[in-house]
Amino acid sequence: MSSADLTSERDLPPEREATAKGDVAPERDGPRDTGMDDASLHRWLARTWRTPPGIIGALSSVDHKVVARRYLITAFGFLCLGGLNAVAMRIQLSGPQRGLIGPDLYNQLFTMHGVTMMFLFAVPIVQATGIYLVPLMVGSRNIAFPRLNAFSYWIYVSGGLFAWVSFALAMAPDVGWFAYVPLSGPEFSPGKRADVWAQMITYTEVSSLAVAVATIVTVLKQRAPGMSLDKIPLYVWALLVTSFVVVFAMPAVMITSTFLILDRLVGTHIFNPAEGGDALLFQHLFWFFGHPEVYIIFLPATGMVSAIIPAFARRPAFGHLGLVLSLIAVGFLSFGLWVHHMFATGLPKLGASFFTASSMLIAIPNGVQIFCWLATLWDGRPVIRTPLLFVFGFFFIFVIGGLTGVMLASVPLDLQVHDTYFVVAHFHYVLIGGSVFPLLGAAYFWFPKITGRMMSERLGRWHFWLAFIGFNAAFFPMHLVGLWGMPRRVYTYPAELGWGNINLFITGGAVLFFLSFVLFAFNLVHGALKGAPAGDNPWDAGTLEWATSSPPPSYNFARIPIVTNVEPLWAEREALPVATGLRVDVRELLISTVAEAHPDIREKSATPSIWPLFAAIAVGGTFLYSIFTPWAIVWGAAPIAITLIGWFWPKDTPEDEE
Amino acid sequence: MAFAAASVLSLQGCAGWQSALDPKGPAANELAWLIWFFIGLCSVVWVLVMIALAAPLLMRPPRRTEPLMLDASADHRKLRVVVIAVGLTAATLVGLTLLSFFANRTLAAIGSNAALTIRVTGHQWWWEVRYEDATPSRILTTANEIHIPAGEPVRLLLTSTDVIHSFWIPSLAGKLDLIPGHMNVLDIKADKPGTYRGQCAEFCGAQHANMGTFIIAEPRAKFDAWWNDQLQPAAAPTGDEAKAGADLFLKRPCVMCHKIGGTPAGGTVAPDLTHIASRQTLAAGTLTMSRGNLAAWIADPQGIKPGSHMPVVELNGDELNAIVAYLEGLK
């Protein structure tokens, strides 16, 4: 095992020496991993990095893996709830003029379905996967800003509960996940339903922003020595680009929802045409977020595909640079397409045509990605295991969704299919094909890392075929029924339009698709309890998360690896070279330079704290209260301030030594 | 499997009277052609991608052993293939962009010489239809059913007084939103006489699903006769029951919202009932026009269209029958 002792290189910049005062010096001279034998190193690190015992300890955890696991389980729970919404809607639509569900409940159901799937499932689950994997893949001991990360989870879970408790009380939003004004405005949505939408959006996006910031800093500053920009794994690139998109897109929807609640709560007239406001402004703001949102969900999935394909094709991804540039291009272009959601609003024709061109343009970097993955697979007979099956499913389904997306990009064509079941089919092909199928593949792929056990391959194949057939049976016919004139968001339809049979068929497919998730849940539980032990690297994959044990210890890596290749485990078959020099008695991270990932400084990582939970309760309470009165902001400021002071209270040891 | 089933289903559904694939006017024709062209091209692209995906599985090349041992010349060849594929993708997309641009121009030209202008105002959950005319006495207001002369372009001015709706008759033209504070212009033309169904396409609240509309295209002479008929004040009630109904209509809350031309009833927040019995449907396409449906609708609007703004008016059986008898006579 070769080792580079960083203390002799750049670890201690000269100015650090100059400022070091007598009382700080002993603190800095705690035990380090340099030359320490493995057994005592593990003992030290385990004690330093452990999550404290007991309930308070669990609630104080700042371990990225613990937080990510909670996120994953919660998001899966919301997926099931959102799926149940969908099944209920499909049963109502299985025949014309069915009286099972009335418009009041139906409108809540489709709103909750959209809100849950977009804000409580898709975005959180892709971010949570990143919270788990990114620090491992870049060879760090924890995510940046671990308390902020813990805070984000509490905010997310309280936002989700807020929405679902409202639903249980029959006061869930019923204005669609997009909540267009004037329908969601004070005049046409009296009561609290639209307020629930507005505040729930604002605060789940706070959580999303927090994770994005932590991810960006982790990727840019905490990479293992040697992981220069060209050696960052594609999955990590995808999460980095996604996080930047989150940072620029989420504020747009937070402004939208905040303007809406201002209109509703304190009588501003931002969206009220009668008072000089404008209803279309809402749509511009919303879709300026809403379109990038699609890519926030899709880009991490492309990262998963880029991680799974090399492992089973037995070679590094073809066109690594092309794939990275495509990710970045998609990230930028995603902000230039929002108007294609608004072609039917009667915008000037020439301006709309510009957005046809930009919407077509984004197909090019997506095409580059598809072609590079195919080229990676051409090199040899791939090893076909469940994760790769789901990637094949992804190709089959997502390419259809992408191509129907090209159809929607055309202004005149869109005017026929906009707001019909054709669009419902399109975006389910994009989101389920483009994101859920890769996510399911990723679940099979990384489950062994998270739990130390394998999921059943046999059940996995059953799961795949059930999901694949169920999905296509449910969603493909929607293209047709949309072209036959069936609009979205209708709770029923007349018999004489002839949509009955096809809708019954769709409902059958939807039930099948739902059952595939029941099978998946069984496979998850079965694997976690009884799966075969996985070992560190069951797929013989090449990235750093496979270098540590399964599940990883609280400190991730006993010694920080040094990266020499984009697939470091393939390049260093015997053992990874490691860097030493980090303290073992306090939580210390190695901070590296942005481009070259030269080791730069050592930085403390935050210790467990209960304050993020308290802060989240204070913030959540304020938001909840604010749907009733604007004074909530005033009264809520005090507890929020107290919890934040507790959170940031100066410690008796200097926080950042180096 | 899904595809086989779907294609069987597609054969039976194409005849639907609300289908974008069954065009009855020049705009929908152009769009149907565009839809089929895009579908054809996209299918070819999809099949090519699937062939490329299946190739390494079907050709069964040897499995790779050493992941980092890459054949540089093979990768170089692949790079060339990828670059060509990206080039073809870009060229295709440019082509499709131009195609859609020119299709848009074709659509814009359809209504350039429209002689008739109709203002359509969206309401929760019905359509107010006003025929504009330079002579004020010829301005006509009706609801939900839009009569037009066949073979002539007609200009629709679309707006809303409450929330956003979207006007869509798939067999004639693409949809366009009705937005409060905005006025959109949609030109339509029906090639032949016929009844073309459409419905609101933008979610507009509780009864979005029951906000249907019809375009009824007729030969010019028949259309002119219809317009003249509709300009007449309401038919006077004949028979005792109908007379009692007319009386009740004015005494009960009906009069607060509805207008019946030639009577004191002048409400404008609900559909104009001057010639209600001449329409084919009730409650924006929810029920077909008949004596029984009229009675059902008046007796239980919230059961038929839950959440609609038509309140339940307490009427006994005789009163209900009287009002229905009166309305039934308003041809």
Image (cartoon, rainbow, N blue to C red):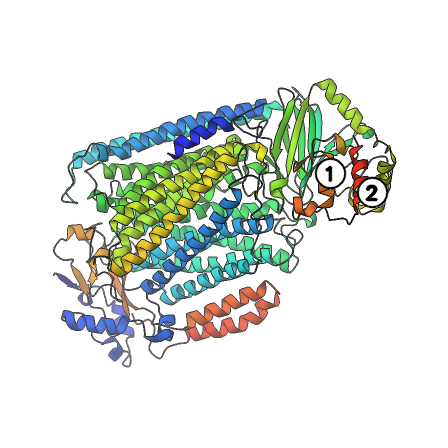
Mark 1 closeness class: few <14, some 14–19, many ≥20 residues within 10 Å: many
Chain letter belonging to callout 2: B
**B155 on left or right of B77:** right
Amino acid type, label 1: Leu
Q: Are marks 1 and 2 in contact (CB under 8 Å)?
A: no
**A117 on left or right of A306:** right
Residue at position x 53%, y 51% from top?
A109
List the residue tagged with mark 2: B249
Chain letter belonging to callout 1: B
Residue B208, image x, y percentages: 61, 43
List the residue tagged with mark 1: B294
Q: Is residue A537 above or below residue A643?
A: above
Residue B159, image x, y percentages: 67, 38
Q: Camera-side residue: A297 or A337?
A: A297
Amino acid type, label 2: Phe
Q: Is residue B264 above or below residue A532?
A: above
